Image (cartoon, rainbow, N blue to C red):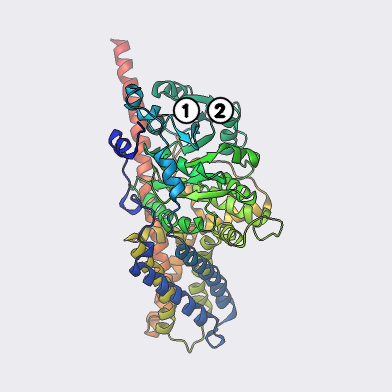
């Protein structure tokens, strides 16, 4: 008797929770609903109307602010148009007849002859195309808290389907080694950290022998049915990997909420669209690979901060296909502090800019389809969107201090706002229509992240190597102001400019658009500064508590020794 999905569902209910913004998303989500399609159409028309308004020669203002606005908006509008096109291309269920047939036959268990195995889903043998399918599950570790690793390891060991779980410890911790033995996982320790996470995986591949291998970051807890929902796709011999979303279960800080929402639209709608072009890329966790595909490209790519995207690009160039399913099968932790968010975004942006400058997808030598070239170009240039706010932040001060305006004086403020919000406002409404909400924290992070992306771009241009950092590693926390000097100085500049602008407007007896724009920018960055102040205070309190926890037992032990 073959174990089927109803038995699987009864064996282990879902044992994880996720924030409402990134809740379980079924394939063929609401992207095809008439209301969402209407909002996408309106957002498209808003972008086109704003572009026509902006490039109308009659509306052109002074050269410098006009050039800043044009450069910024060209980047934003072009990426918005490609994103809308990509989203509209999605919505097709990648699970065809072959998938369902393979899934139905995946667990090869005779409950009558082997009742012990039948009651232990983690021991169920798996078959694909009438052959045994062997799977290794890698948990990459580099200094994360022990309780975080344990939570992931226990869930990985308990996944349905016979597999071997390996903890790949680049932190070389005896405690992690002992934990692996305790939870029933195997343990691998390297002598060096060469190649960072990709090198860690490649080292494990040289030791293990499974036909397929899954990768989970230390903080991503997999669902029991992960293999059941992903492995059947490999019945197609061309499939190199199957990627599932990154979803986050923590929302205790503004940074965590903003970072989670920032990623959720991508995983819900953009990645499924990329799937239609065979251009969905690996994101480094919650993914399962075919070993022979990785061997075909020489292993996971180690010479980049974004080994996942690079490896995906190499696989697509070799003719392999990828699958993305928008079903949450693992839940992790979003960066909770400004420092963690900064290091995460620095790592991702560096990898994107490396692709642009050293492996440009438009290069004719790259064996990619036209659609893949466009999608990877968008990936490589995506973080220019994060630099754009710097240009737009400079426009109001040019008007306030030098009377330089981006548009002709004949264009009224109301007319400008009509087209401006026709583009930006519709993007927010589209987020509401597709996600059911919009978090202002995401807007805040988008406005203040330009120093991160600018530094990443300069680092790639100059060839400066960036040290690998994990998100939320176990280390001593420092003040967030140590990593946000640029944002702090910019806030001071904008605040002083707002004072000057208000003073001038009071003298003229009228509020100008430049003043309103600059004050808005000041408030947005000010919210980030307030967030940093609260975070710094929390870190100081935690440090005091740790010192007190160490100091009190020491005094007690001294008294006991004296007595």
Q: Earlier in the sequence, mark 1 or mark 2?
A: 1
Residue 228: mark in rendering:
none
Name the quadrant containing residue 121.
Answer: top left
Whether residue 458 is visible, yes or no, is no
Whether residue 36 is visible, yes or no, is yes
Give SS at disc 2. loop
Name the one closer to the observer, 356 or 500: 356
Q: Give the residue at the far right of this rendering.
A: 365
Label 2 crowd (10 A; few <14 / some 14-19 / many >=20): some
**Mark 1–mark 2 CB contact (< 8 Å):** yes
Q: Seen in the image, is 274 located left or right of residue 513?
A: right
Name the one closer to the observer, 191 or 29: 29
Q: Is residue 363 above or below residue 108?
A: below
Q: Residue at x 33, y 36 (%)?
A: 8
Name the quadrant containing residue 366.
Answer: bottom right
Mark 1–mark 2 Cα distance, whole angstroms, equals 9 Å
Label 1 crowd (10 A; few <14 / some 14-19 / many >=20): some
- Marker count (numbered): 2
Give SS at disc 1. strand
Badge 1 is on which residue? 164
Quadrant (top left, top right, bottom left, bottom right) of the N terminus:
top left
Residue 52 percent coordinates (x, y): 51, 81
Q: Give the residue at the far top of this rendering.
A: 563
Residue 286 percent coordinates (x, y): 45, 42
Badge 2 is on which residue? 208
Residue 240 percent coordinates (x, y): 56, 44
Q: Residue at x 51, y 42 (%)?
A: 234
Quadrant (top left, top right, bottom left, bottom right) of the C terminus:
top left
Residue 51 percent coordinates (x, y): 51, 78
């Amino acid at each position: 008797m073959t174990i089927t999905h109803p038995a699987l569902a009864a064996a282990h209910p879902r044992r994880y929770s996720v924030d409402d913004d990134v809740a379980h998303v079924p394939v063929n989500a609401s992207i095809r609903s008439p209301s969402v399609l209407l909002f996408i159409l309106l957002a498209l028309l808003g972008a086109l109307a704003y572009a026509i308004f902006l490039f109308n020669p009659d509306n052109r203002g002074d050269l410098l602010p006009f050039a800043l606005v044009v450069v910024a908006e060209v980047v934003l509008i072009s990426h918005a148009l490609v994103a809308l096109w990509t989203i509209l291309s999605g919505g097709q269920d990648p699970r065809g007849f072959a998938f369902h047939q393979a899934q139905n036959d995946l667990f090869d268990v005779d409950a009558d002859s082997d009742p012990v195995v039948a009651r232990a889903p983690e021991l169920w043998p798996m078959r694909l195309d009438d052959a045994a399918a062997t799977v290794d599950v890698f948990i990459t570790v580099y200094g994360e808290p022990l309780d975080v690793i344990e939570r992931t390891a226990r869930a990985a060991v308990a996944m349905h389907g016979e597999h071997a779980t390996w903890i790949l410890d680049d932190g070389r911790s005896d405690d992690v080694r002992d934990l692996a033995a305790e939870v029933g996982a195997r343990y691998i320790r390297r002598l060096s950290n060469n190649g960072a996470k990709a090198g860690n995986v490649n080292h494990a591949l040289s030791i293990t022998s499974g036909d397929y291998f899954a990768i989970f970051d230390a903080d991503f807890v997999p669902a029991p049915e992960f293999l059941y929902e992903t492995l059947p796709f490999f019945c197609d011999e061309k499939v190199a990997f199957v990627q599932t979303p990154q979803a986050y279960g923590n929302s205790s800080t503004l940074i965590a909420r903003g970072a989670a929402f920032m990623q959720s639209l991508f995983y819900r709608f953009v990645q499924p669209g990329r799937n239609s072009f065979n251009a969905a890329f690996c994101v480094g966790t919650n993914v399962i690979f075919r070993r022979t595909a990785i061997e075909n490209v020489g292993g996971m790519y180690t010479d980049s901060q974004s080994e996942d995207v690079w490896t995906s690009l190499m696989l697509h160039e070799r003719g392999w296909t990828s699958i993305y399913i928008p079903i949450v099968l693992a839940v992790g932790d979003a960066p909770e502090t400004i420092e963690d968010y900064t290091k995460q975004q620095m790592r991702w942006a560096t990898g994107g800019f490396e692709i642009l400058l050293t492996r440009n997808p438009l290069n004719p030598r790259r064996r990619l389809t036209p659609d893949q070239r466009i999608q990877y170009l968008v990936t490589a240039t995506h973080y220019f969107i994060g630099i754009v706010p710097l240009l737009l932040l400079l426009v109001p001060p040019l008007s306030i201090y030098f009377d330089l305006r981006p548009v002709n004086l004949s264009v009224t403020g109301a007319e400008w706002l009509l087209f401006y919000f026709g583009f930006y406002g519709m993007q927010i409404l589209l987020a509401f229509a597709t996600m059911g909400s919009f978090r202002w924290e995401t807007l805040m992070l988008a406005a203040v992240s330009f120093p991160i992306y600018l530094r990443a771009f300069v680092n790639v241009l100059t060839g400066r190597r960036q040290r690998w950092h994990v998100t939320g590693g176990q280390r001593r926390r420092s003040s967030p102001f140590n990593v946000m000097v640029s944002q702090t100085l910019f806030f001071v500049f904008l605040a002083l400019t707002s004072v000057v602008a208000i003073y001038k407007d009071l003298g003229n007896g009228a509020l100008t658009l430049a003043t309103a724009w600059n004050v808005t920018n000041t408030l947005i960055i000010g919210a980030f500064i307030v967030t940093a102040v609260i975070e710094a205070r929390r870190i100081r309190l935690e440090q005091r508590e740790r010192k007190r926890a160490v100091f009190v037992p020491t005094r007690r032990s001294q008294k006991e020794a004296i007595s």
